[in-house]
Image (cartoon, helix red, strand yellow):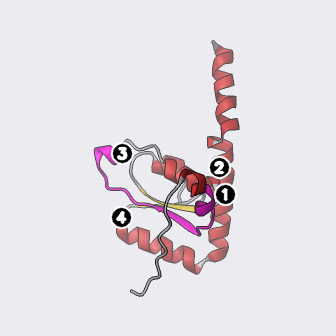
């Protein structure tokens, strides 16, 4: 439908910079045993960059991404479309969700957060 596509070669060095350029990050997954075992890492990458994750409601995704607060969770392809259209038409809300996503990523998934959790575990031993 007349979409312009720009293919960007993925590299470890450039991944964070390229992700930060996105308005929204999509993480569609089939509902399969393999996909249910994934860890939502791509969603956390989007969140850490302040990018709104739009993820499938598969596995742990809906636990990591709080629907309509830190991202959008889609039950099927039609919801993916609806969520992306909503973000396109509501730039202010997209910015707000992206900001919430960044705060959540720092609070719950950063190295500092993991270090504090490990410290707490070690102190209980």
Question: Which of the two discs, 1 and 3, labels the residue nearer the N terminus?
Answer: 3
Helix, strand or loop at mark 3: helix
For label 1, count other residues whose C-alpha is less than 10 Å away and answer few (under 14), some (14-19) or many (20+): many
For label 4, count other residues whose C-alpha is less than 10 Å away and answer few (under 14), some (14-19) or many (20+): some
Q: Residue at x 47, y 70 (%)?
A: 7
Disc 2: which residue: 104
Q: Quadrant of the N terminus?
A: bottom left
Disc 4: which residue: 76
Disc 1: which residue: 100
In-image side of 110 versus 4 (left or right):
right
28 magenta-colored: yes
Helix, strand or loop at mark 2: helix
Alpha carbons under labels 3 and 2: distance apart: 22 Å
Percent across and percent down for residue 97 are 63, 63
Residue 79, picture quadrant: bottom left
Q: Which residues are magenta?
A: 16-36
Look at the image and tell me whether residue 120 can be seen. Answer: yes
Q: Quadrant of the C terminus?
A: top right
Q: Residue at x 56, y 73 (%)?
A: 87
Percent across and percent down for residue 57 are 41, 55
124 magenta-colored: no
Mark 2 touches mark 1? (CB < 8 Å): yes
Disc 3: which residue: 36
Alpha carbons under labels 2 and 1: distance apart: 6 Å
Alpha carbons under labels 1 and 3: distance apart: 25 Å
Alpha carbons under labels 1 and 4: distance apart: 24 Å
Percent across and percent down for residue 123 are 69, 16
Question: Which of the two discs, 1 and 4, labels the residue nearer the N terminus?
Answer: 4
Alpha carbons under labels 2 and 4: distance apart: 25 Å
Question: Which of the two discs, 4 and 3, labels the residue nearer the N terminus?
Answer: 3
Furthest residue toward top: 125
């Amino acid at each position: 439908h007349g979409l312009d596509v720009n293919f960007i070669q993925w590299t470890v060095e450039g991944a964070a910079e390229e992700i930060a350029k996105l308005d929204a990050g999509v993480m569609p997954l089939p509902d399969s045993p393999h996909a249910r075992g994934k860890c939502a890492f791509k969603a956390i990458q989007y969140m850490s960059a302040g990018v709104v994750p739009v993820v499938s409601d598969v596995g742990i995704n809906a636990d990591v991404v709080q629907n309509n607060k830190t991202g959008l969770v889609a039950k099927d392809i039609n919801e993916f479309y609806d969520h992306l259209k909503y973000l396109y038409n509501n730039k202010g809300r997209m910015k707000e969700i992206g900001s919430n996503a960044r705060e959540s990523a720092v609070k719950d998934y950063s190295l500092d957060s993991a270090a504090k959790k490990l410290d707490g575990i070690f102190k209980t031993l």
